[in-house]
Image (cartoon, rainbow, N blue to C red):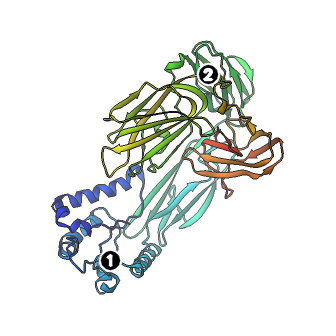
């Protein structure tokens, strides 16, 4: 629903009238970007019954509405005419401009009726139960279109609303078409097929080790059903499993498989000097806000062409869990075109105790290299203030954190508390679709175990109850709290007992 035009009629705004049509068309193009095709209403604004704040009804009626009408015809959108609807309802506008609560209820009813009586030719949804299947597997396709649509699925006539069980044996694209008198819509799903022998996943965690640390990396893999043989560096291994490696220098390992096809994956574990490792890459984080298509992980993916964008509030923050303790010496911020002039760094332990903090007030965009830090901790919170553009959010292309590991023992008394639990890495990891989490608690109390996605959204709650000291095991079957399967990806499981919290990552591969 796009309902613009009232404020545009103010003299200081209508000086840009020559840009109105193009800007409106550009906005619609953004909503339709990357193949999306939402049902869009370009609405006519209601009348201005008084000329308050410079809002002028004549401009709305004779100049703005004709331009919106041109937009809805050129862009092939729907329209709701609030101007004619409210023309004789000035009593719902106490100040002549702003509608009251009863007027909003009328507007809501108009919108409801418009959506309910949508014309034919719109796809409400088209999705699959799973976008990847293996040998002898099936999955459902689900769709719904607006009433009266003539619907086809891969050229075959289909119902307006229905589902279909499919069992492709190769990569297959399913295309749904909905056609009406004026509108038409298309949506496609690429269904991946993984034959026996295909390596579905292979990766090292962590992918980078500190030189001289003698640390290990866990290389895990999942192959398609029916895979008959797997070899890791020419030694036979389970077709789904993992192995710890402790390289002294950067090393590339090979995984080869056999089935209906043969496949090979090369996994490299880098061994680097401690002060050259970016500790922030792919670490879990929380932010004050984000835009839907610019989430926080885009600032922690090691890719300079992606970015996190905040909402427009002046004060914003990001908190990064490094998952281990480091002596942090340097933080580098790579800004987009909207930056903060003031930055505040807080380094803390897992109990929230602040170990080191420092402020910077000379940010000018580009790259901010803060290389005079000395804090030893696990969590890094960065606060941003002083936006370069007042009415937009901050844009951060990448955050780098550099520090050296150090044993936590004996650093400070505030870290010597006995933890309330230990939690193991889930196994198997990656998994499909079932995994098991083992944990041990040392004190009686309420234990909460929750699964989140990488945007910080709660997926499901596995445990929330008082438990006695002891060892426990809980499984997760890759479903959300409503019992529906979730998609492949990286998830976080967070366990809380008392004031102690621990978060680990797990990978679901379907």
Along the line of sight, which residue is nearer the eye, 313 or 119? 313
Vertical order, 160 against 140 (above or below)? below
Crowding near pointer 1: few (<14 within 10 Å), some, many (20+)? some
- Residue at image x 66%, y 43%? 493
Lower sequence index among marks 1 and 2: 1
Query: Left or right: where does residue 232 sit relative to residue 20?
Result: right
* Residue 129 in view (yes/no): yes
- Dot in front, 1 or 2: 2
Where, by quadrant of the figure, is residue 55 drawn?
bottom left
Where, by quadrant of the figure, is residue 64 drawn?
bottom left
Vertical order, 404 against 474 (above or below)? above
Quadrant in which the N terminus appears = bottom left
Quadrant in which the C terminus appears = top right
Say which residue label 2 marks: 406
Where, by quadrant of the figure, is residue 238 drawn?
top right
Q: CA distance from mark 1 to mark 2?
A: 65 Å
Along the line of sight, which residue is nearer the eye, 82 or 264? 82
The percent coordinates of residue 320 (x first, y second) are 53, 37
Vertical order, 132 against 369 (above or below)? below
Image disc number at residue 227: none
* Residue 510 in view (yes/no): no
Q: Label 2's element?
A: loop
Query: Left or right: where does residue 374 sit relative to residue 64?
Result: right
Q: Label 1's element?
A: helix
Along the line of sight, which residue is nearer the eye, 336 or 129? 336
Say which residue label 1 marks: 82
Query: Left or right: where does residue 236 sit relative to residue 508?
Result: right
The percent coordinates of residue 2 (x first, y second) are 35, 65
């Amino acid at each position: 629903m796009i309902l613009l035009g009232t404020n545009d009629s103010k003299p200081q705004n209508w000086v840009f009238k020559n840009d109105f049509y193009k800007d409106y068309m550009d906005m619609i193009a953004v909503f339709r970007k990357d193949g999306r095709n939402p049902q869009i209403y370009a609405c006519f604004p209601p009348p201005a019954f008084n000329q308050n704040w410079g809002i002028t009804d004549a401009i709305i009626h004779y100049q703005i509405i004709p331009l919106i009408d041109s937009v809805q015809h050129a862009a092939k959108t729907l329209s709701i005419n609030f101007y004619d609807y409210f023309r004789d309802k000035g009593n719902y506008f106490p100040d002549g401009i702003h509608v009251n609560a009863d007027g909003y209820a009328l507007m809501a009813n108009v919108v409801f009726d418009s959506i309910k009586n949508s014309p034919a030719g719109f796809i409400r949804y088209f999705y699959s139960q799973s976008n990847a299947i293996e040998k002898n597997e099936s999955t459902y396709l689900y769709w719904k279109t607006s009433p009266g649509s003539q619907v086809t699925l891969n050229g075959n006539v289909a119902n307006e609303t229905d589902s279909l069980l499919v069992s492709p044996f190769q990569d297959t694209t399913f295309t749904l078409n909905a056609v009406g008198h004026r509108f038409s819509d298309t949506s496609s799903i690429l269904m991946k097929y993984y034959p026996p022998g295909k390596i579905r996943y292979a990766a090292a965690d962590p992918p980078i080790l500190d030189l001289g640390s003698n640390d290990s990396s866990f290389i895990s893999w999942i192959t398609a059903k029916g895979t008959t043989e797997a070899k890791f560096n020419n030694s036979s291994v389970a077709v789904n499993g993992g192995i710890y490696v402790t390289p002294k220098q950067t090393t590339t390992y090979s995984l080869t498989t056999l089935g209906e096809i043969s496949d090979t994956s090369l996994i490299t574990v880098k061994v680097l000097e401690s002060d050259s490792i970016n500790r922030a890459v792919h670490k879990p984080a929380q932010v004050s806000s984000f835009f839907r298509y610019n989430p926080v992980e885009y600032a922690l993916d090691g890719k300079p062409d992606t970015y996190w964008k905040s909402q427009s509030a002046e004060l914003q923050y990001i908190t990064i869990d490094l998952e281990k303790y480091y002596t942090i010496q340097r933080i580098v911020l790579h800004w987009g075109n909207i930056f903060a002039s003031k930055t505040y760094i807080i380094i803390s332990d897992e109990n929230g105790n602040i170990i080191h903090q420092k402020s910077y007030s000379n940010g000018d965009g580009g790259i901010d290299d803060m290389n005079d830090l000395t804090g030893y901790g696990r969590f890094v919170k960065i606060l941003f203030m002083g936006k370069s553009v007042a009415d937009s959010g901050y844009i951060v292309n990448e955050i780098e954190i550099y520090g050296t590991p150090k044993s936590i023992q004996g650093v400070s008394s505030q870290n010597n508390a006995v933890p309330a639990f230990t939690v193991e890495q889930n196994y198997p990891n990656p998994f499909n679709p079932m995994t098991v989490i083992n944990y041990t608690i040392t004190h009686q109390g309420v234990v909460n175990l929750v699964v989140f996605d990488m945007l910080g959204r709660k997926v499901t709650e596995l445990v929330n109850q008082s438990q006695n000291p002891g060892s426990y095991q809980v499984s997760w079957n890759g479903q959300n709290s409503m019992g529906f399967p979730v998609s492949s990806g990286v998830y976080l499981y967070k366990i809380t007992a008392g004031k102690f919290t621990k978060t680990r990552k797990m990978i679901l591969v379907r």
